[in-house]
Image (spheres, grey):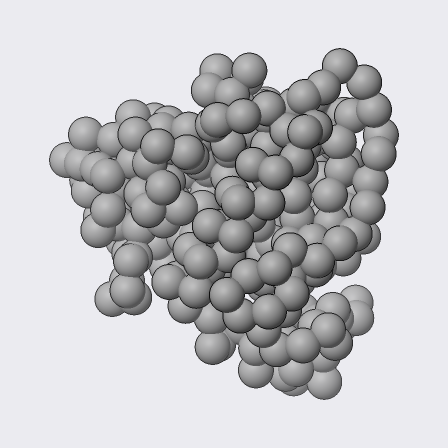
Amino acid sequence: MIEEILDITTKDGAMETFICRPERNGPHPAVFFLMDAPGIREELYDMARRLGTSGYYVLLPNLYYRAGRDTKYGPDVLEHGSAEHTRMRAVRTRMTIPPMMDDIAAMLAFVDRQKEVRKGAVGCHGYCMSGPYALAAAARYPDRVAAAASFYGTWLVSDAVESPHLSLGKAKGELYIACAEHDDLAPPDMVKELQGLFRQSGAGGELEIYPGVHHGFAFPQRKVYDKAAAERHWERLLALYRRRLD
């Protein structure tokens, strides 16, 4: 594996990005791995490496870069009321979809200049807050994003600008939406509404509910980690990318 951390130039500044790719047999398809709310950490680097060893050129950007370099948080970031949680929420609550789509455009321009990246289609998947971003990217860039996945994406049906439920039918690629059975950030009524909208949109793909698990089940360092569900998530994601990118 070859890995590096570098800045990708965007409309709003320099977006620090972790990149990993196989050492041999390139060029490889590009995959955009979008972080969850707690932000960039070693746990996500390891997940990116797992994707890289499967044959992909993986980009994991720090989507909080607009708030500065000091946007990586300590282990108590998930503890409500902690200093790190408060610091993270001050950045997270200002996030909106349109600037994230500008970041996707910058990432597309970046990979198009890399000889190690296979030209053409890319994949994009996000967790938690970035689930909507991944789906929105498939709608905003339908001729480039051939596969997009949301894992316990938050508020996939909302009044946000470019909320993914409004544009599912614009995606030409295959979509995969995974929801946890127990998730206050994607409650059952919202998931039921999204299922109906997904069917009506004519979008290709699947919405799957993972029974018995909670928001965050795929992260090995999280208390709610569920190994069986996490491995299913990897199987679904890798199968999606193999169908659409390889």
Q: Residue at x 75, y 31 (%)?
A: 21
Q: Is residue 228 above or below residue 24?
A: below
- The answer to whether residue 185 is seen in the rendering is no
Left or right: 66, with 43 as reference point: left
On screen, residue 21 above or below 220: above
Residue 137: percent from left, percent from top: 40, 46
Q: Quadrant of residue 68?
A: bottom right
Give the tally of numbered discs: 0
Image quadrant containing the N terminus: top right
x and y percentages locating residue 119 in the rendered image: 54, 25
- Residue 83 visible in rendering: yes
Q: Which residue is rendered at x = 82% and y = 40% of the image? A: 3
The C terminus, quarter of image:
top right
Q: Which residue is rendered at x = 57% and y = 82% of the image? A: 90
Q: Residue furthest left?
A: 200
Instruction: Please name whichever residue, 100 or 150, is drawn nearer the observer in this view of the structure.
Output: 100
Q: Position of residue 93 (x, y in %)?
A: 48, 76
Query: Does 200 sit above or below residue 136?
Result: above
Residue at 50% in and 56% down: 103
Q: Is residue 21 left or right of residue 131?
A: right
As rendered, which of 238 and 144 lies closer to the eye? 144
Does residue 55 appear left or right of residue 169 in this picture? Answer: right
Estimate the x, y position of residue 151 in percent, counting from the top left: 50, 43
